[in-house]
Image: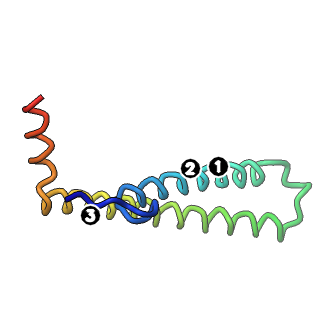
Amino acid sequence: MAYEAETPFDSVEGAQEYLKLLSEALLDARRDIERDIAGPADSKPPRRLEALRLVLYKLERLEHHLKASCRELNDLRTLRRLLLQERALMAAAARSK
């Protein structure tokens, strides 16, 4: 009997999709901050520039954690398939077609 997810976060695949969307938003934010830092320095107060660099650092750390989380979710999906023998079932279904 297959388990039906009630919310997008009830499955590993749902969590992977969420992290993918979060990574895309993070990339957009990072590009915006990098563009703001690269702009004319004389028009920015030093404290603002320092704050922008700190934001960029925090975004880079978050990106690192997201990549690690994606790897962990991938491992969990692989282990689930191994435990539930999903791959054997999929291969048998493909052979029967």
- Helix, strand or loop status at disc 2: helix
Q: Residue at x 89, y 65 (%)?
A: 45
Seen as rendered, the residue at the extreme front is: 1
- Helix, strand or loop status at disc 3: helix
The label shown at residue 75 is: none
Quadrant containing the C terminus is top left
Mark 1–mark 3 Cα distance, whole angstroms, equals 28 Å
Left/right placement of residue 38 relative to residue 28 reads right
Amino acid of disc 2: Glu
Q: Residue at x 83, y 66 (%)?
A: 48
Amino acid of disc 3: Leu
The label shown at residue 28 is: 1
Q: In the rendering, at what x and y percent does residue 10 appear? A: 39, 65
Q: Which circle's residue, 1 or 3, is located before the other in the chain? A: 1
The label shown at residue 24 is: 2
Q: Residue at x 74, y 48 (%)?
A: 35
Q: How many C-alpha atoms fall within 10 Å of the one at disc 1: few (<14), some, or many (≥20)?
A: few
- Helix, strand or loop status at disc 1: helix
The quadrant in which residue 94 appears is top left
Q: How is the image coloured?
A: rainbow
Q: Is residue 61 above or below residue 95?
A: below
Q: How many C-alpha atoms fall within 10 Å of the one at disc 3: few (<14), some, or many (≥20)?
A: few
Quadrant containing the N terminus is bottom left
